[in-house]
Image (cartoon, coloured by chain):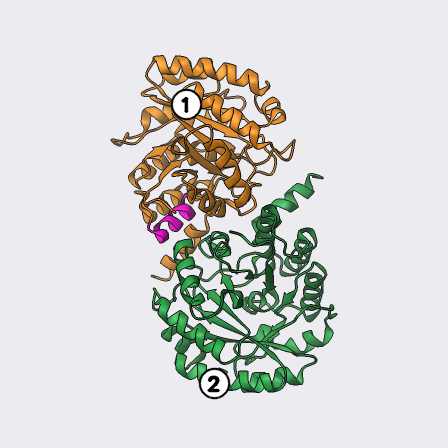
Chain colours: A green, B orange
């Protein structure tokens, strides 16, 4: 049932680094992004135009975008919460891809972006329309698709509604995010199948966090029902600052290791990817959260 | 495709602890095993009767078996490499389950047990026959089923041959071990399907190590083709002393979290299991390697 090829969306430089406690130097971000594109990642979420007071790690996104070496064919989307963010993004050098986000949980929406789901969708429709006018592609994120840190279970119908609303406002791709990593394979599959009834599965991406160690199993589960786009984060960076207990996104290295083993092409060179993550982790002063990265490093250490 | 219920074989007290650098006190082993049976594990590999010089951590297995509280219905197999081990095991209190092991890789067999696969199978056939005479059930392990630290790829045909030989000598169950954790879902499934052509799938168990983060995805892959017995290790303890770079078995907590989420009964209470692993990890002085255990602990820490 598995596809021959998938597309990986690297979210480490944004979803990953936004969560870091310490300041990550601009040069390290730029080096990371350039190393990721050199490793073959086709889409790299490069930053966010959000209130710097709320997410200080993303305050230098314009400078990051100006400094990276843009590789032909690689897309560098940035996260944008509202019209103000869109304005800042379009004033930055070369933004032609943005991502917007809404929650499938009412409480999460209120705590995270201080408005109801309906209000956030209205706001995003305006952002999407303006972006479209300027020829900017828009990706939509739905958060809390398999659970909410405040509400617990989230109704699949609600996920379908929000995903359909984002698709209707022109998002070319809808990324379904298990923000707090509580999902398991059967439920992940049911959720994706339900959403695929409203938005073609080719336009869906799966975005799993590895909080409970379930991310790779969830990826396998939805890979087998037609999902071919997966968000992941080099070295397992990240989490969500507003979701208590959320640990990192699934590590890109672990995903690529699985895909390589399954004979599914991603275009990513695992060794270059590992080194990209390692360099960043050396800056951060901690080992990669990726098991594959750690095992490969141990093998290298023995000259293997 | 998934079953309604599975059987978990807890191997932490043996496959896990045999790899510890420091000495684990007898009392801690006994407490761990008793906490695991109280958590609902139906099979707990409790020790090994191997040369104490080679695996010092298992030198007190007879004392462990004498001290544990045997819960009705729970089985406590011990690993036995040869007739000498069988003798020691039968002299110990109440051994009515043993496990024997062979490799699917010739080089691994030679380096690990100093004889060819064929020689090891001859030796084990004698052990199995004697055990049977005494009414002792025998489980067979095949190691290196998805790769060998020395040879790299391992032919599936060889795995089938070794599994069939163990079944033929009377092993009631064959556990297929990805000793170095290099396997990925498609290959895992192909391997299990091939073995199931020689040994009924009901008699197969899957034993995945999480070295490259693939274990849970591999479990899902073979769960969906009929495997209902899985080896796992509380807190992700373990590895293989003779397989360089091999990290722990898949963490029982991560497996139970997935099964609970999928509505597949294992009979294991996740919270009791987590506390069993936590107590042992406190003795070892390090956090559990289980992501689910860590996430649940973080949630508890917030009073959640």
Give the crowd class for mark 1: few <14, some 14-19, many >=20 residues within 10 Å. Answer: many
Residue B262: in magenta span: yes
A87 lies above or below A185: below
Q: Which chain contains the residue that carries disc 1?
A: B
Residue A217: in magenta span: no
In front of the other: A27 or A227: A227
Q: Which chain contains the residue that carries disc 2?
A: A
Establish whether labels 2 and 1 are both on one chain. Answer: no
The alpha-carbon separation of the residues under discs 2 and 1 comes to 65 Å
Contact between labelled residues 1 and 2, with CB atoms less than 8 Å apart: no
Q: Under tag 2, what secondary structure?
A: helix
* Label of residue B171 in the image: 1
The percent coordinates of residue B184 (x first, y second) are 55, 44
Q: Quadrant of the C terminus of chain B?
A: bottom left
Number of numbered discs on residues: 2
The percent coordinates of residue B122 (x first, y second) are 51, 14
Q: Give left or right: position of B281 versus B118.
A: left
The percent coordinates of residue B83 (x first, y second) are 46, 13
Q: Is residue B20 visible?
A: no
A47 lies above or below B252: below
Q: Where is mark 2, residue-wise?
A: A123
Q: Which residue corresponds to the image point at 48% horizontal and 20% vertical from the top-left? A: B81
Q: Under tag 1, what secondary structure?
A: loop
The residues colored magenta run: B252-263
The percent coordinates of residue B301 (x first, y second) are 38, 59
Q: Give left or right: position of A294 versus B61.
A: right
The majority secondary structure of the magenta stretch comes to helix
Give the crowd class for mark 2: few <14, some 14-19, many >=20 residues within 10 Å. Answer: some
């Amino acid at each position: 049932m598995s596809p021959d090829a998938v597309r990986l969306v690297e979210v480490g430089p944004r979803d990953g680094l936004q969560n870091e406690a310490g300041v990550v130097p601009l040069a390290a971000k730029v080096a990371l992004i350039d190393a990721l594109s050199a490793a073959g990642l086709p889409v790299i979420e490069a930053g966010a135009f959000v209130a710097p007071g709320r997410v200080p790690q993303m305050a230098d996104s314009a400078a990051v975008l100006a400094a990276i070496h843009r590789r032909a064919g690689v897309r560098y989307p940035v996260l944008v919460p509202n019209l103000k963010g869109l304005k800042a993004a379009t004033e930055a050098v070369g933004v032609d891809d943005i991502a917007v986000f809404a929650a499938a949980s009412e409480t999460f929406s209120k705590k995270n972006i201080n408005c109801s789901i309906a209000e956030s969708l209205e706001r995003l429709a305006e952002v999407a329309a303006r972006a479209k006018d300027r020829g900017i592609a828009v990706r939509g994120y739905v958060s809390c698709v398999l659970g909410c840190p405040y509400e617990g279970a989230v109704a699949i119908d609600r996920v379908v509604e929000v995903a359909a609303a984002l698709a209707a406002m022109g998002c070319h791709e809808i990324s379904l995010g298990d923000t707090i990593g509580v999902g398991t394979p059967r439920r992940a599959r049911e959720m994706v199948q339900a959403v695929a009834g409203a938005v073609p599965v080719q336009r869906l991406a799966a975005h799993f966090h590895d909080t409970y160690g379930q991310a790779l199993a969830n990826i396998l589960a939805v890979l087998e029902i037609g999902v071919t786009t997966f968000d992941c984060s080099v070295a397992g960076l990240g989490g969500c600052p507003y979701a208590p207990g959320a640990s990192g996104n699934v590590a890109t290295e672990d995903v690529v290791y699985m895909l390589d083993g399954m004979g599914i092409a991603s275009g990513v060179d695992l060794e270059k990817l590992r080194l990209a993550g390692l360099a960043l982790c050396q800056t951060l002063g901690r080992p990669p959260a990726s098991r594959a990265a750690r095992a490969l490093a141990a093998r290298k250490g023995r000259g293997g």
